[in-house]
Image (tube, rainbow, N blue to C red):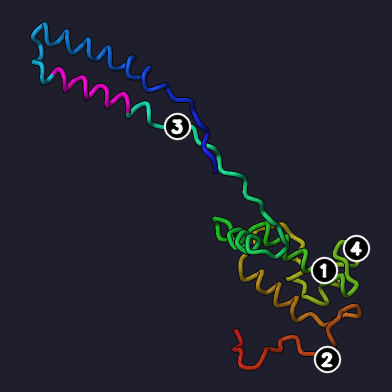
Amino acid sequence: MTRKHTPRTPPLRALLTVGLPALAACVALTLTGVLDLLHAALLVVVAGTTVALWRRLDDGEETPWPDVVHDRREGARNDVSELGWATFTRSGAVGDRVLRRVRDLAADRLAERGVDLAAPGGPAAAASLLGADVVHGLTTSRPVSRGEVHRWLDALDAMPAGPHSSAPSDAPSTARPEGRPER
């Protein structure tokens, strides 16, 4: 980061514009008897030092930091963090962004089995796979609790494999790796 160079007043000019008036004030205060010679000289030194320091200070303008390049990748750490903060609203209900993602996931999983919730017979076909309460929750716009979303995800995990699914139909849906406890 580079600083802007501000032109400074030449030292001789600064000495003349500050020193001469201070010296004149010193002479005037000494001749009128307001200050003795020592205190008048100290006043000139203090005034000259104060002005010199004041002129050396930065004028307050700073060069802005360069913009940070954000590499946005799907599933990146930023997405996980943002999703974590967007999970719940202030009232404790599940946030709209999380609901949208869960509903998209449900639509994708149902589409793998040839079911479309927007089709005329879609909700009935989805209810046979997921259950009527899960389909009702997925299609309404009311606030949803954490427990309801857990039930939806469990129902999606337990859904039987369809004709277009890549998972074998005889594999158990709740299989866990060895040594891993069940939650």
Left or right placement of residue 161 versus residue 90 in this view: right
Name of the residue lying farthest toward the bottom:
178
Q: Residue 108 carries which label?
A: 1
Q: Which of marks 3 and 4 is nearer the N terminus?
A: 3
Sequence-first disc among 2 and 3: 3
Q: Position of residue 125 (x, y in %)?
A: 87, 72
Q: Residues within 10 Å of mark 1 (few under 14, many from 20)?
A: some
Q: Against 161, is 30 above or below? A: above
Binning the other alpha carbons within 10 Å of mark 2 as few (below 14), some (14 to 19) or many (20 upward) gives few
Q: Say which of marks 1 and 3 sits in front.
A: 3
* Marks 1 and 2, how far apart at CA: 21 Å
The image shows residue 129 at horizontal and vertical percentages of: 82, 77
Q: Mark 3 points at which residue?
A: 60
In the image, residue 43 lies in the stretch drawn in magenta: yes
Q: Which residue lies furthest to the front in this view?
A: 12
Q: Mark 4 points at which residue?
A: 119
The residue pinned by badge 2 equals 170
Residue 112 falls left or right of residue 139: right
Q: Nearer the viewer, mark 2 or mark 3?
A: 3
Q: Distance between the residues labelled 1 and 3?
A: 56 Å
Q: Position of residue 79 (x, y in %)?
A: 66, 61
* SS category of the residue bearing label 3: loop
Q: Which of marks 3 and 4 is in front?
A: 3
Mark 4 secondary-structure assignment: loop
Where 55 falls versus 177 (above or below)? above
**Left or right position of 128 against 47:** right
Q: In which quarter of the image is residue 155?
A: bottom right
Disc 3 residue type (three-letter) = Gly
Q: What stretch is highlighted in magenta?
A: 40-52
